[in-house]
Image: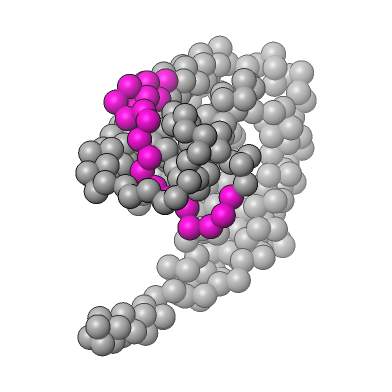
Amino acid sequence: MSDILIDDRIRDWVFLPIIIVMFMIQMFRGLLTKYMDNKKTTQKVTSKAQVAEMIDKNITQQSQRLARLHGLLPDHSFKMKRAHLCDNKSGILTKASEKPAKDPMQSMSMMNPAAMADMLKQNLSGIVFMALQYQWVSYFFSGFVIGKVPFPLTQKFRSMLQRGVDVQNLDVRYISSISIYFVLLFGGLQKIQQLMFGDDTDEFVDDTQMQMQMQMMGMPTMPSFGQQNDPGKLFIAERTRLEGVKHTFELNKSQDKAIKSLKRFLNQ
């Protein structure tokens, strides 16, 4: 089949509304999740195990934040923070990795029913949000072709890229509106969410994306016992990750990038 001409109004009344509405829903869910998490952290800690769990979580978040945003720090500041975490004698990750693993059976007996209920509520909310978005896109925008990929594809991609469009002679490179919905759902809005919600969004985005994928596959979303009962392995992995970071101060290049951008703009 020859190439087709896509009307500009499809961009304005199909593609942009899908992006805007999905972004607003994800933003609402992210703010709701942060609100619930902040509400949980303000509750009274009733046991030493909960205190230790919060300390381990804060150490992990500090390490992940440093590995992700190291380019914003000068070289000496990054080295000081990495030494604070990874020093062979006094590093926080080094000391934390020496903790013994927890007994799985003991952890199961001490499992908090409230935490399990919160996990169930979060999984159910994810299913509800996914169902509402899918029904909305299917009802209003089913059957629209809104784009075309610039490289050749085989026929195996037709069912993935052209959901809701039953035209067998249509080139497989064309993308339907429902397929764009799935692309945005599983990662397309991730960077925008990170810019809106800040540093703590990576955890929410990664957990949400993983839960959605597991829910689509019919798999349970509870964490494995290995992750719960052996935090030492997690700290060792974080330490190895930080030690392997090749640090470069990104702001040193900002002036050169600005000059190059200005020259390109003036030469146009």
Asked which quadrant contains residue 145, the reply is top left
> Which one is in front, 244 or 150?
150
The answer to whether residue 223 is above or below residue 244 is above
Relative horizontal placement of residue 198, taking residue 95 as reference (left or right)? left
> Which one is in front, 162 or 246?
162
Residue 61, given in percent of the width and then of the height, sits at 52, 47
The answer to whether residue 157 is above or below residue 149 is above
> Which one is in front, 165 or 70?
165
Q: Which residues are magenta?
A: 131-153
Q: Please give the name of the residue rendered at 47% of the width and 17% of the height, measured from the top-left corner.
A: 124
> Which one is in front, 234 or 152?
152
Image quadrant holding the C terminus, namely bottom left
Seen as rendered, the residue at the extreme front is 1
Residue 86, given in percent of the width and then of the height, sits at 65, 60
Residue 34, given in percent of the width and then of the height, sits at 37, 34
Relative horizontal placement of residue 232, taking residue 18 as reference (left or right)? right
Residue 135 highlighted magenta (yes or no): yes
Asked which quadrant contains residue 174, the reply is top left
Q: Please give the name of the residue rendered at 46% of the width and 20% of the height, measured from the top-left corner.
A: 127
